[in-house]
Image (tube, rainbow, N blue to C red):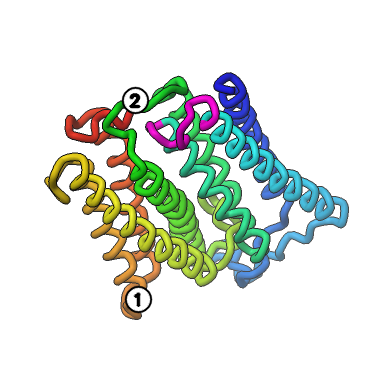
Amino acid sequence: MAALSNQLFVVSVVAYLAAVIAFATAHALRGTDRSRRPALVAAGTSSMPLRPEAPTPARLENHRRAGLGAVMAMVVAALAQAGCLVARAVAAGRVPWGNMYEFIVALTLVGTVAWLALAARRREVRPLGLYVAVGAVILLGVAGLRVYTPAGPLVPALQSMWLAVHVSAAAIASGLFLLGFLAAVALLLRARYDARGAGRPTDLRDTLAMRLPALQPLRRMSFRLHATGFLVWTFAVMAGAVWAEASWGRYWGWDPKETWAFISWVVYAAYLHAQATASVRPTTGAWLAVAGWATMVFNLFAVNLVISGLHSYAGT
C-alpha cells in the first residue's frame, strides 16, 4: 500500500502537469478579452480603436476541448491524491497527515477540490484553474523532492486523537487559504491590466490577466474562501491549544509554531476587516491575503525545518 501511495502521488503530479498544459492551450486559443473597451492603438498618435480578435468556430471548439481536458486532468489529479492519502493511511495505520509531506498533499487536495466545486457552479472562475494547477505542481514537487517521509508510525508525541482534529482542521484551512491566495494574485493581475487600459497584452502578466474574471467576482471568491478558512483556522488553533494542555500542561507557551499560527490569524483577521471596510481598495485586501499566505508558508517550512521548538518533529 505504501508503494501504491507513492505511485498515485506521481500520477497526481503528472495529471497536474497535463492540466497546466491544457489550461495554457485553452488560454492561447481564446480570443482577446472582449469585456473591456478597446484601447487606442498608441496614445497620442491615433484615435482608431483596436478591433477585438474574433476566434473562428474551429478555434472556439479547440478552446472548449482544451478547457474540458484541463478540468478532467484536475479531476484525475484530485482522485489520485485522494487515493494516495487513503493508501498511505492503510499502510501506516493512522490518519495520513502526520508529517509535512502528508500535510502538503492534503492541503493541496483541499484547494483542488474547492476549485472544482466552485468551477462546477460558476463558469467564470474556471480560468483560475491554471493558477491552481501551477500551485499544486510547485507544492507537490517540494513535498516529493524535499520533505518526503516513508509511511510509518508516528512519534509518541503525535499519537493522539487530537491529531485527527487539530491537523485536519489546519489542512482544510490551509487548502482554502491557498485557493484564496491564488484568487488574490489573480485579482492583482486583473487590476493592473484594467488600470493600464491597454487593449492588447504587452507582457506575460497582461496575457494572463486578460483571461481572468472581472475584479468583483475575484474579490467575492477570495473573500468567501478566506472567511471560511479563517473560521476553520480559528478552530484549529483552539484545538491545538487543547492538545497542548493535554500534552505539555499548558494551553499556550509561545512556541514558534504557536506564535506563527497566531501571526497568520492576525493577518487574516486584518484582511477580513479590510474587505469589510468600503474605503479600502480591493488591491489592498489582496496584498493582505498574499501576506497571510506568506506567513502560512513560513510556518509550514521555516518553523518545521529551521526553527527549533516543541513542534520540530512535524517534519518527520
SS for dot 1: loop
Rendered-image quadrant of the C terminus: top left
Indicate whether residue 121 is drawn in magenta. no
Indicate whether residue 90 is drawn in magenta. yes
Q: Which residue is mark 2?
A: 316
SS for dot 2: loop
Q: Position of residue 253 (x, y in %)?
A: 12, 46
Residue 73 appears in the rendering: yes
From the viewer's perspective, tell me whether residue 297 is left or right of residue 122: left
> Mark 1 is on which residue type?
Ala
Q: Position of residue 207 (x, y in %)?
A: 58, 51
Residue 185 appears in the rendering: no
Q: Position of residue 6 (x, y in %)?
A: 56, 23
> Mark 2 is on which residue type?
Thr
Residue range (magenta): 89-100
Total marks shown come to 2
Dot placed on the residue nearer the N-terminal end, 1 or 2: 1
Q: Nearer the viewer, residue 29 or 196?
A: 29
Q: Which residue is mark 1?
A: 276
Which residue sits at x=44%, y=29%? 142
From the viewer's perspective, tell me whether residue 219 is left or right of residue 254: right
State the image quarter where residue 15 is shown: top right
Q: Position of residue 258 (x, y in %)?
A: 21, 46
From the viewer's perspective, tell me whether residue 307 is left or right of residue 32: left
Q: Nearer the viewer, residue 295 or 124?
A: 295
Residue 146, relative to residue 68: is it above or below? above
Q: Nearer the viewer, residue 124 or 242?
A: 242
Please rate how many residues cluster around mark 2, counting C-alpha atoms within 10 Å: few if below 14, some from 14 to 19, many from 20: some
Residue 175, relative to residue 18: is it above or below? below
